[in-house]
Image (spheres, rainbow, N blue to C red):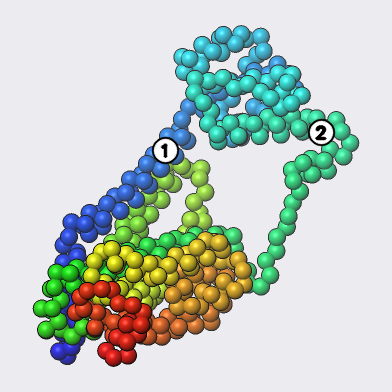
Amino acid sequence: MKPGWKQVWAVLRREYVERVKTKGFVFSTIAIPVLMLGTTGLMAFMAVRAEQSNRQMALVDFTGEVGEEVARRMDAAGYDVEIVDAQVGLEELDRRVLEDEIEAYVLLDDLTVQEGAFGYRSKGSPGRVRGALLESIVVETVLELRLSVMEDAVGVRQLLDGGRMEFERLGEQQSEVQEASGIATGIAGVIILYMAMLLYGQFVLRSVLDEKRNRVVEVVISAVTPGRLMLGKILGVGSMGMTQLGIWALCAALIGLLGVPMLAASLPQADLSQLGELLPGVGVLLLLLAYFILGFFLYSSLFAAVGAMCNTEEEAQQANFPVIMLLIVPFMFQMFSIEGGGFAWMDWAALLPFFSPIMMFPRAASGAVPWWMVGLSLLLMVIAVGATAWVAGRIYRVGILMQGKRPTLRELARWVREA
């Protein structure tokens, strides 16, 4: 290994080991998978309990017209419905509910046939989902009853259902599952890229700023050139980030491998046959990795330059605002076009190197842009990484040893020319 790369490796190893050994890294690396596992387990537990909860209900039909059809539809929705004779007193039904013989009972009367109103009596609230389901069942049943005595009842019924739109996609065909998978992968990728570049870029800034404030860099710089020191810091923090993201990805994969069979066993009636199609392919994951690496180098160079030109935490917070805005603006644009659509100029804006990780990846994952635009965005990012690293390296070379007032834009331009 050449002496220059030995220096970069020494800085990289130091940055990596120091950060990996911190309590914050260990806690965050472990806490996120535990939180994911706990959330997944809680959701699965609640889903199973909800599915296995008492669904025994009684139905009292004072109309003599819609009770059987309402009971049939409730049975189809998964409820165990008992049609009770109208002569049975409500006090008896109240007793059965209070003694947990049944969960609730439904009352259908003349007002039900006229307005679709009905009664629901239980110890607890039915909740929004159950309430909406029962309302739709009763209203549809009454509506069909009243339409049955009208002419052209089928046509009126179709109009009341809201009509039907038949959608046909032009060009390359994608199944609904593939389209949903692409959109979901794109949204998840945007969040991961945004948080990772912002979080790990701040790590680089703070590392540079801390060494400059403590004047440790004055000692380190005697053995390592500024350019190699900056490169080692970026590579060290990047390696730490890749380690953390790799651990999280592995934990997510294990949770999926363990959670899906458990969910399938707990909910045998659930259709999980298309779950595999929802998972992103290897090509999409490699593309996400490429955008992460290039985006990290692009923004970390800027954050390193900001750390080198500042002396205090307050100065750094003000100076890194333009860099953060370079992340926020494309993130906001992407939220406006969550499915990869929006204005046509957004596809071209996604070619800007500082916007590409946030805007181009979701478009590529959902198939909203041609492959040549994806390739061009990666090529432009490679060029931008080289140019940004060159400019940031010159600022870093001068600023890392400078003390006093934060430089102006004119002074920064002079640093770049004269470094």
Q: Residue 46 shows which numbered tag?
A: 1
Residue at position x 75%, y 24% in the image = 113
Q: Residues within 10 Å of mark 2 (few under 14, many from 20)?
A: some
Residue at 28% from the left image edge and 73% from the top image edge: 406
**Quadrant in which the C terminus appears:** bottom left
Q: Where residue 34 sits in the image (x, y, percent)?
A: 29, 50
Q: Which residue reaches farthest front?
A: 405
89 relative position to 217: left or right: right
- For badge 1, the amino acid type reads Met
Quarter of the figure with residue 309:
bottom left
Answer few, some or many: residues within 10 Å of disc 1's Cα (few below 14, many 20 plus, some between 14 and 19).
Answer: few
Which callout, 1 or 2, points at the residue further toward the start of the chain? Answer: 1
For residue 260, say whether it is visible: yes
Please state the total of marks drawn on the protein image.
2
Q: Amino acid at mark 2?
A: Leu
Query: Where residue 147 is drawn, which disc sits there?
Result: 2
Q: Classify mark 2: helix, strand or loop.
A: helix
Secondary-structure class at tag 1: helix
